[in-house]
């Protein structure tokens, strides 16, 4: 098949997927902008993709999210349309990971990591046992499965196990020569270090990542981690500066060199980090508007999933710290249907801490409401 025909076929397939989810070209462009945190994508560009005039080089992962298809599928189709491959990419390491663990990631996004963390460990260890000398492709598979297991363990509040999985992911990725997975493992290790109070370790990991000429979205995410670590250390000026750099680079950060896993580094992620940094700096009044914005953003993606629990709990936390008791009732009342759907010990721990503050310091009517809507 010639490249012109391949591009047209890719465009026709993209158009069919868009119509299947009942989106116009303008609506698809708007949702992609929301996911990526940019405002530069237009309906005209989507039209060019569908006519085969251009390929969405930097957009396969966000497109997959909006269109409800595996990211590896769109990446493989785009690669063939560019003439890079002539056969399906089902043997690509990431495609193998999606086959082995894709349902675990989908479950986590919808329902949290508590009930699938052990399944992820089983999948990871099963593939690790199949490693043979010199098989770097399989090493990349095992490194990614270790990263997935670590994330689900972290969401299940099993921090020590998560850290061990991410350390193994890092070492395995190094053996495989997989730089993007090394960046991801170090990023997640930095996140865990901040959560566990090892700020120096988190900052050292950020320095190691940014010293490697990383793609824009990886650099942006590293600035977010750096900002959180500096805020945890009480360094107000440098924390705000790091978060400001991340925000200012969001609009122009989308790049074809960005690794597949970085698609979720978007406006929601940046806004959430901005608000969390304000909380760490004991500035809940600055955090509240940020969490109100995350409420709008997450509602457009998954209003009852794990992300909804995280941001509703964070908004409640900020309002309680501010002593805004009347306002705190709204996110509290939003929680019951989410809690019925999501099992995430990491977020439930934070919620329990906030509810204890309401019980101790809040008005009796709010404490009564909290006991009714979130039974102990």
Image (cartoon, rainbow, N blue to C red):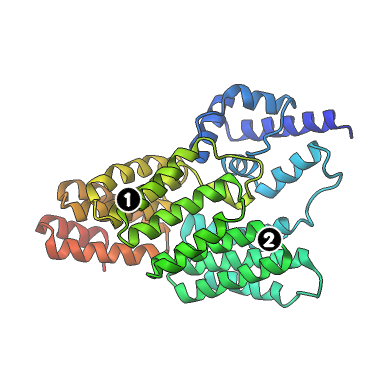
Farthest top residue in view: 44
Say if 345 sits above or below 224 in the image. Answer: below
Residue 272 visible somewhere in the drawing: no
State the residue in front, 167 or 148: 167
Residue 188's spot in the image, x, y percent?
51, 62
* Picture quadrant of residue 375: bottom left
Say if 289 sits above or below 93 in the image. Answer: above
Q: Residue drawn at (41%, 70%), measured in percent from left and top?
A: 198
Residue 97 - label: 2
In space, the residues marked 2 and 1 are separated at their CA atoms by 41 Å
Farthest right residue in view: 1
Residue 76's spot in the image, x, y percent?
75, 45
**Badge 1 element:** helix
Q: Residue drawn at (30%, 50%), measured in percent from left and top?
A: 334
Residue 151 visible somewhere in the drawing: yes
* Picture quadrant of residue 246: top left
Q: Which residue is mark 1?
A: 237
Q: Is residue 328 left or right of residue 41?
A: left
Number of residues whose C-alpha sits closer than 10 Å to that of mark 2, classed few (under 14), some (14–19) or many (20 or more): many
Residue 365's spot in the image, x, y percent?
12, 55
Q: Earlier in the sequence, mark 2 or mark 1?
A: 2
Number of residues whose C-alpha sits closer than 10 Å to that of mark 1, classed few (under 14), some (14–19) or many (20 or more): few
Q: Residue drawn at (79%, 37%), measured in percent from left and top?
A: 82
Say if 135 sits above or below 239 in the image. Answer: below
Disc tally is 2
Quadrant where the C terminus lies? bottom left
Quadrant where the N terminus lies? top right
Q: Is residue 288 left or right of residue 173?
A: left
Residue 319's spot in the image, x, y percent?
22, 51
* Picture quadrant of residue 157: bottom left
């Amino acid at each position: 098949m010639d490249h012109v025909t391949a591009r047209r076929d890719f465009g026709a397939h993209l158009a069919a997927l868009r119509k299947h989810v009942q989106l116009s070209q303008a609506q698809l462009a708007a949702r992609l902008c929301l996911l990526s945190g940019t405002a530069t994508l237009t309906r005209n560009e989507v039209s060019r993709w569908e006519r085969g005039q251009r390929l969405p080089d930097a957009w396969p992962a966000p497109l997959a999210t909006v269109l409800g298809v595996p990211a590896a599928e769109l990446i493989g189709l785009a690669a063939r349309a560019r003439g890079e491959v002539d056969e399906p990419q089902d043997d690509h390491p990431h495609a193998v990971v999606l086959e082995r663990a894709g349902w675990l990631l989908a479950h986590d996004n919808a329902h949290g990591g508590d009930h699938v963390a052990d399944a992820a460990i089983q999948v990871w260890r099963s593939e690790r046992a199949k490693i043979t000398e010199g098989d770097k492709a399989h090493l990349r598979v095992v490194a990614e499965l270790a990263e997935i297991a670590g994330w689900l363990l972290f969401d299940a509040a099993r921090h020590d196990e998560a850290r061990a999985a991410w350390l193994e992911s890092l070492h395995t990725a190094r053996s495989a020569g997989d730089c993007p997975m090394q960046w991801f493992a170090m990023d997640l290790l930095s996140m865990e270090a901040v959560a566990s109070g090892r700020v120096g370790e988190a900052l050292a990991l950020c320095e190691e990542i940014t010293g490697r000429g990383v793609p824009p979205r990886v650099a942006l995410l590293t600035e977010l981690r750096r900002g959180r670590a500096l805020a945890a250390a009480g360094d107000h000026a440098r924390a705000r500066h790091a978060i400001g750099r991340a925000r200012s680079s969001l609009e122009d950060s989308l790049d074809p060199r960005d690794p597949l896993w970085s698609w979720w580094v978007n406006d929601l992620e940046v806004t959430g980090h901005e608000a969390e940094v304000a909380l760490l700096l004991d500035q809940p009044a600055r955090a509240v508007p940020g969490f109100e914005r995350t409420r709008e953003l997450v509602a457009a993606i998954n209003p009852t999933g794990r992300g909804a629990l995280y941001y509703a709990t964070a908004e409640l936390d900020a309002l309680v710290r501010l002593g805004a008791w009347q306002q705190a009732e709204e996110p509290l009342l939003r929680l019951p249907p989410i809690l019925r759907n999501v099992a995430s010990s990491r977020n439930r721990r934070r919620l329990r801490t906030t509810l204890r503050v309401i019980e101790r310091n809040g008005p009796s009517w709010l404490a009564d409401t909290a006991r009714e809507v979130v039974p102990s």
